[in-house]
Amino acid sequence: MLAGAGWVLWQRFRKQDIKSYLWPAIPAVMGAVIIGAGIYQAKHTPILDAPVSAEAAAKVDLPLGARTIKLEGNSGQGWQLLDQQSIKAHDRVQQVEVPSLNAIAAFKPGDWNAVRVVVTERTLPRIGIPAPCLILMVVAIAAGIFLNHTIYGRYLLALGRNEEAAKYSGINTDRMLILAYVICSLLAGLGGVLFVMDVNSAQPVDFGNFYELYAIAAAVLGGCSLRGGEGTILGVIIGACLMRVLKNMITLVDAIPTHIEYAIIGAVILAGVTVDELIKRYAAKRAAIRQQQEAQEG
């Protein structure tokens, strides 16, 4: 959300066309709406209906962080306070037992027909940012600055586009290739360390098998060309998020067998490459038509 908003402001400052900053505004607005809804939900006072009857009691699940609750009853003259108690806050869902209507009438006479639980005090959950997310942000910002605002980053993009052309233009391609492999190895090592810290174990025989397939698929989904020379850091991050969503979908959806996970990922890569090729051909055709029209007008 912050990246989208920053992009909008930057493009606005540069007075670019509205199309150049319209699409990042969509996730910015969606993120603001989600954050606002979360704050409202956290601060809103929950009112929970207790499905009790004349003889049967009921258990009511309390929201996370509930500290103080009130038990209210209705006898046809509005809601009245029956009891109030404090609850020790816990990081998991807790339950409170609500007595039956007859039991309530025994200690507080009345013709009670409905009971509810009102949470009057809550401890808001801490909104923390995981350390891997912070590392991702730092690496993404550093990679974006390196690729787009340094001469060596532009050299790498030129090298990926056409190695021979980059060599004839005066770029030391051997040195840039070594630099690319060194950066790739460092980031792979960092990812491996984070992965080991997440699962808390590692086997040198098969640990991390086929994870390069996820990386390739994420890059393709993010707009990177397998020919090289094209791609953005933001696109790669979005592609990685989509791959994670796809992996979870394969696991959760019963209609998709889990043993064809790699086949689905391969199909995603194939679809991404096909779409990339079709877009390139369409763009080249449009450019040729435009050049032909300009030549005829000239």
Image (cartoon, rainbow, N blue to C red):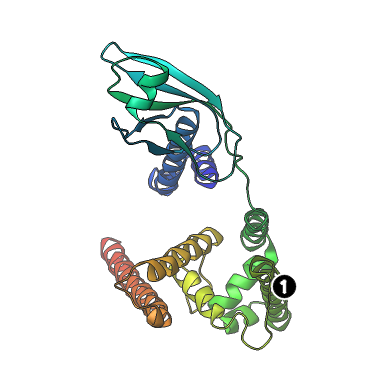
Element marked by disc 1 = helix
Q: Please state the horizontal and vertical placement of residue 292, each as a whole percent of the image.
A: 28, 68
**Residue occupying the far top of the picture:** 77
Q: Residue at x 63, y 45 (%)?
A: 128
- The quarter of the picture where residue 107 lies is top left
Return the residue nearer the eye: 31 or 260. Answer: 260
Q: Please state the horizontal and vertical placement of residue 86, each as a whole percent of the image.
A: 57, 27
User: How many numbered tags mark residues here?
Assistant: 1
- The quarter of the picture where residue 103 lies is top left
Q: Residue at x 55, y 78 (%)?
A: 211
Mark 1 Cα shell of 10 Å, populated few (<14), some (14-19), many (≥20): few
Q: Is residue 212 above or below residue 110?
A: below
Left/right of residue 77 with respect to residue 37 in the rendered view: left
Q: Amino acid under label 1?
A: Leu
Left/right of residue 138 with respect to residue 34 in the rendered view: right
Q: Is residue 54 above or below residue 279?
A: above
Q: Which residue is mark 1?
A: 186
Q: Is residue 69 above or below residue 181?
A: above
Return the residue nearer the eye: 227 or 289. Answer: 227
Q: Please state the horizontal and vertical placement of residue 217, each as a whole percent of the image.
A: 47, 74
Left/right of residue 5 with respect to residue 182 in the rendered view: left
Q: Please state the horizontal and vertical placement of residue 4, each as a whole percent of the image.
A: 50, 46
Q: Residue at x 31, y 13 (%)?
A: 78
Return the residue nearer the eye: 13 or 188. Answer: 188
**Residue occupying the far bottom of the picture:** 205
Q: Residue at x 69, y 85 (%)?
A: 204
Return the residue nearer the eye: 124 or 137. Answer: 124
Q: For the C terminus, which image quadrant? A: bottom left
